[in-house]
Image (tube, grey):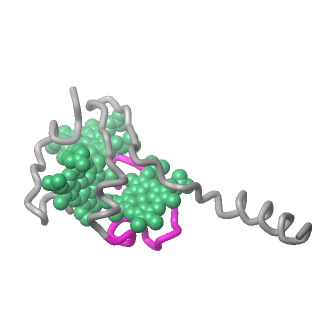
Amino acid sequence: MKKLIVVLALLIPLSGFAAPLDLYIYENKNGTVVFTHANHSKAFNCTECHVQKDVKIEMTKDFAHKSCRSCHAVKKVNTACNFCHNR
Ligand code: HEC
Ligand code: HEC
Ligand code: HEC
């Protein structure tokens, strides 16, 4: 039991992979973006966005506009700036 706790304690900081939040809020110069992780992860496979199921995403403007906006274009969701950016 002691051994197991030590192993877990080592694994968590190494992977750094926390549980997802239901909502991610990105404040940025172009207007705050609210991303509903809960809805999106019910509708799509994890690997549509994560390189692998357990790989963390570093959100950047490039990632957002390639991943988020491209999928919205393919799925014919509104791609207007203010669909995502609230300003
Ligand atoms: C539509 C895109 C998308 C889908 C589908 C998706 N995710 Fe995510 N996920 C994200 C984004 C964006 C973040 C937030 C990244 C950030 O800003 O920290 C995130 C964050 C996470 C995190 C938190 C990581 C951390 O260390 O902070 C976990 C865990 C996670 N997702 C797991 C999953 C799993 C498991 C699935 C499939 C059931 C899934 N995601 C589906 C886009 C997605
Ligand atoms: C794999 C495809 C896909 C990806 C990637 C994706 N979306 Fe979406 N998103 C959708 C679809 C489809 C809808 C429409 C769902 C509906 O009509 O209920 C949607 C709806 C939304 C909505 C409005 C509804 C809601 O749940 O809030 C927002 C805002 C949004 N997406 C933001 C984002 C952001 C920000 C990202 C990137 C972090 C992202 N999306 C990534 C497919 C995607
Ligand atoms: C599908 C959702 C979505 C759409 C549509 C979208 N964006 Fe974004 N955009 C994001 C997200 C998410 C970020 C946040 C990235 C971050 O926080 O690092 C972002 C970041 C940005 C930034 C960087 C701001 C900063 O502080 O560095 C600019 C500029 C920007 N977007 C402009 C636009 C413009 C202009 C349009 C319309 C042509 C647009 N975006 C459409 C999701 C979207």
Region in magenta: 45-67
- Residue 77 in picture, x, y percent from top left: 11, 55
- The answer to whether residue 85 is above or below residue 56 is above
- The answer to if 42 sits in the magenta stretch is no
In the image, farthest residue toward the top:
87
Q: Could you tell me which residue is drawn at 30 percent across and 58 percent down? A: 40
* 11 left or right, relative to 65: right
- Residue 53 in picture, x, y percent from top left: 47, 71
On the question of residue 69 being in view, the answer is: no
Q: Could you tell me which residue is drawn at 39 percent across and 44 percent down? A: 23
* 7 left or right, relative to 80: right
- The answer to whether residue 69 is above or below residue 74 is above
- Residue 9 in picture, x, y percent from top left: 79, 60
Closest to the observer, 84 or 45: 45
Q: Could you tell me which residue is drawn at 51 percent across and 66 percent down? A: 55
Quarter of the image that includes the N terminus: bottom right
Closest to the observer, 21 or 69: 21
- The answer to if 58 sits in the magenta stretch is yes
- Looking at the rendering, which quadrant does residue 86 occupy? top left
Q: Could you tell me which residue is drawn at 31 percent across and 40 percent down? A: 34
- Residue 54 in picture, x, y percent from top left: 52, 68
* 74 left or right, relative to 19: left
Number of dots carrying numbers: 0
Quarter of the image that includes the C terminus: top left
On the question of residue 59 being in view, the answer is: yes
Q: Quadrant of ligand 3?
A: top left
In the image, farthest residue toward the front:
1
